[in-house]
Image (cartoon, helix red, strand yellow):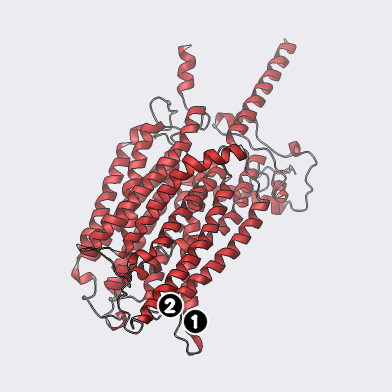
Amino acid sequence: MAVEEGIDDYTQDGTVDLKGNPVRRSKRGGWTACSFVVVYEIFERMAYYGISSNLVLYLTRKLHQGTVKSANNVTNWVGTIWMTPILGAYVADAHLGRYWTFVIASAVYISGMSLLTLSVSVHGLKPPPCHQANVDDCKKASTLQLAVFFGALYTLAVGTGGTKPNISTIGADQFDDFHHREKAQKLSFFNWWMFSIFFGTLFANTVLVYIQDNVGWALGYGLPTLGLVISVLIFLAGTPFYRHRVPAGSPFTRMATVIVAAIRKWKVPLPGDPKELYELDLEEYAKKGKFRIDSTPTLRFLSKAAVKTGPTDPWMLCSVTQVEETKQMLRMIPVLVATFVPSTMIAQIHTLFVKQGTTLDRHLGSFKIPPASLAGFVTISMLISVVLYDRFFVPIMKKWTKNPRGITLLQRMGIGLVLHIIIMITASLIERHRLSVAREHGLVENGGQLPLTIFILLPQFVLMGTADAFLEVAKIEFFYDQAPESMKSLGTSYSTTSLGIGNFLSSFLLSTVADITKKHGHEGWILNNLNKSHLDYYYAFFAILNFLNFIFFLVVIKFYVYKAEVSDSLHALTEELKVMRLKASNQEESRA
């Protein structure tokens, strides 16, 4: 009995320690290990948002860049931040594993943060102060100054590429999907994970932003740098408690072999019975702590990669499970595309929304509110919305739909998309009111501050947080949940890729609209002087774009097929193994 309990104590999902030895459930993983990961994320989000939240104002006030240039520099950098996780996921899955990729990337991240703090602290690394209303009249930053500042920003971006896709999956790896209790705990982990992001983000958007605006940029950037160092040390302290997954090879290579094999056999007919396709023995999957995936009728062309034609070269013959893994990743791409436009809306929070705030009255008694701190209301709104969603919305919807999540992940994302349409309509109407006040008080030409409280912008920030509670939370869970077990890091990087492309799309749209609307002698929609600009038209354009994107999303989800539940697949695998072993036992008995 004791031996059986000892065997049962070992994880069944293939996780090991750093030396490659099997791990006991009682010694490693679970909430003990996850506590280090969650605390790390609080400090890391504080560091990242401590830089990104107020970056547009640093570029404007200290490096003397105009509206379009400063906003585009922010979105290009943030876009890179969210795109580099694809590279980090590849290195982790194919070569170093998640732990060592994370550790090395953390050293790069800290180097970038340290150099950035240095660039805002040393007087010779920034242009002289300028108090002109029009930044075009100020002395521009030199090539060296820009090289140091942006070099630090993009070094930091490379570092986050290795940390971002791996830290959440390291946390999820601490729970065994083959163990009923731990599988349930994994769902709870994602809730705490989101809470850690909320907490770190809120601190950055309030305390750090205030320090940057009122005390100094050196301290405002120095504190998140120190926080990042502390967070990495906390993560390293948890090393003896972590479970690790052995690198399973590049997901890109596995997907490429399926596509190439299918193309090379495009003339070969598919057999009528899917069981005639090539597949590994169940024992092979069981030994590796993985499960087999049955052939599905979607994307049938790729199934040709598993048709037996003689050659067993991996670029000519792939298992059904490998084909289905590739199908799962490809099936998610249309959903991924549908998230690009709302990600572009999110990019406005730390760019144009903040720039709008600089034109308004920011006084609350004797206290002066930093424009970027309104982003804190996005976080607060998101936190409240998530709690209300879990406590009230899900239980009510569960009674109607019988779905344990209340509604499907794609339905939750759809609600978020509708909210984005409402957000941009609201933002357009608020901006229209702001411009009318500027005209009434003769503040259009001089770009002066309006006698209008900054809190008129609150609805667009609060609604953005509510939309995030639906769309962003569902997006992270959807891409993780729907990705094959061996491609979880790549699945996680889908959600970050969405934000990356959304930011690049924001840069493209801002530059394009600014250029087009200046043609034929017109003033243009987006100028350095926001009181002369027409952001109301720009936001209305975004509302139309969101509506068209929602129509596209409805078409996509109509044809999307969810992958089978892991628990169902495991149950089927276990039962099939029992049947095979029983048959083998009977055959041996009959021979005897």
Name the residue tied to disc 2.
526
Percent coordinates x, y for residue 530 in the rendering: 38, 77
In the shown orientation, is residue 418 left or right of residue 224?
right
Identified at 28% across, 80% down, the residue is: 133
What secondary structure is marked by label 2? loop
Q: Which secondary structure, mark 1?
A: loop
- Name the N-terminal-most of marks 2 and 1: 1
Residue at the (79%, 48%) spot, across then down: 269
Q: Nearer the viewer, residue 573 or 413?
A: 413
Percent position of residue 156, x then y: 34, 58
Q: Is residue 585 above or below residue 126?
A: above
Quarter holding the C terminus is top right
x and y, in percent, of residue 31 in the image: 39, 33
Please, what is the three-letter code of the amino acid marked with disc 1?
Thr
Q: Please, which residue is most extreme toward the front here?
A: 440
Most foreground residue, 202 or 107? 202
Count residues near mark 1 (Cα–Cα under 10 Å), then give few for <14, some for 14-19, many for 20+.
some
Q: Residue at x 32, y 75 (%)?
A: 450
> In the rendered structure, are the residues bearing label 2 and label 1 in contact, judged by CB atoms less than 8 Å apart?
yes
In the rendered structure, find residue 517 and report the number of the disc placed on it.
1
